[in-house]
């Protein structure tokens, strides 16, 4: 068997255009790899990527309802994916920019992680989806 690699994560959103714009500004996800419209199902999708190969699929379905978690521990009360973790080169700068300039909600400020040299913080996107920002000693 060949090596398995991560391809993308899919995120259900209420406003596809708004989330595309936010993730483009916040994380540089500006390359549209795929766009699908299925009017009979009330679904529109877009797969966005950045120059380094990070891919996120956004799926808008009319009538969908949000799932909100106050923090990463509350998210584990349901057996599902709990957050999107993104590695950033400078955690303090990323946290400050996202919360001050991009409208991300602050959940937990930068703090030391369990692994030596690793730090993390949590924010939410404009629709309340939980994002973990990770900085490692290796960059």
Image: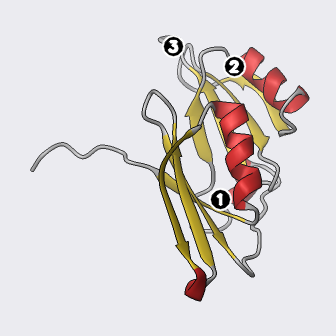
One can see residue 64 in this view: yes
The reply to whether callout 3 and callout 1 are in contact (CB within 8 Å) is no
Q: Earlier in the sequence, mark 3 or mark 1?
A: 1
**Crowdedness of circle 3 by 10 Å Cα count: few (<14), some, many (20+)?**
few
Q: Earlier in the sequence, mark 2 or mark 3?
A: 2
As drawn, the label of residue 76 is 1
Nearer to the camera, 131 or 57: 57
Calculate the distance from the C-alpha at mark 1 to the C-alpha at mark 2.
24 Å
One can see residue 129 in this view: no
Calculate the distance from the C-alpha at mark 3 to the C-alpha at mark 1.
28 Å
The reply to whether callout 2 and callout 3 are in contact (CB within 8 Å) is no
Q: Earlier in the sequence, mark 1 or mark 2?
A: 1
Nearer to the camera, 46 or 93: 46
- Residue receiving disc 2: 91
- Give the left or right position of residue 113, taking residue 92 as reference: left
Which residue shows up at 77% across the image and 69% down it?
66
- Residue receiving disc 3: 139
Which residue shows up at 80% across the image and 56% down it?
127
Which residue shows up at 53% across the image and 11% down it?
137
Q: Which of the two discs, 3 and 1, sits closer to the camera?
A: 3
- Give the left or right position of residue 93, taking residue 49 as reference: right
Residue 73 in picture, x, y percent from top left: 71, 51
């Amino acid at each position: 068997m060949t090596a398995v690699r991560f391809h993308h994560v899919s995120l259900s959103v209420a406003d596809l255009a708004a989330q595309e714009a936010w993730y483009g500004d916040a994380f540089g996800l500006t390359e549209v790899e795929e766009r699908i419209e299925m009017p009979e199902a009330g679904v529109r999708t877009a797969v966005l990527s950045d120059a380094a190969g990070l891919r996120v699929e956004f799926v808008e379905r009319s009538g969908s309802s949000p799932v909100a978690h106050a923090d990463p521990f509350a998210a584990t009360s349901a057996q599902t994916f709990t957050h999107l973790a993104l590695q950033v080169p400078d955690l303090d700068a990323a946290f400050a920019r996202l919360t001050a300039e991009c409208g991300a909600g602050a959940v937990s400020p930068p703090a030391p992680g369990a692994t030596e040299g690793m730090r993390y913080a949590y924010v939410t996107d404009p629709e309340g989806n939980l994002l973990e920002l990770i900085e490692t000693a290796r960059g």
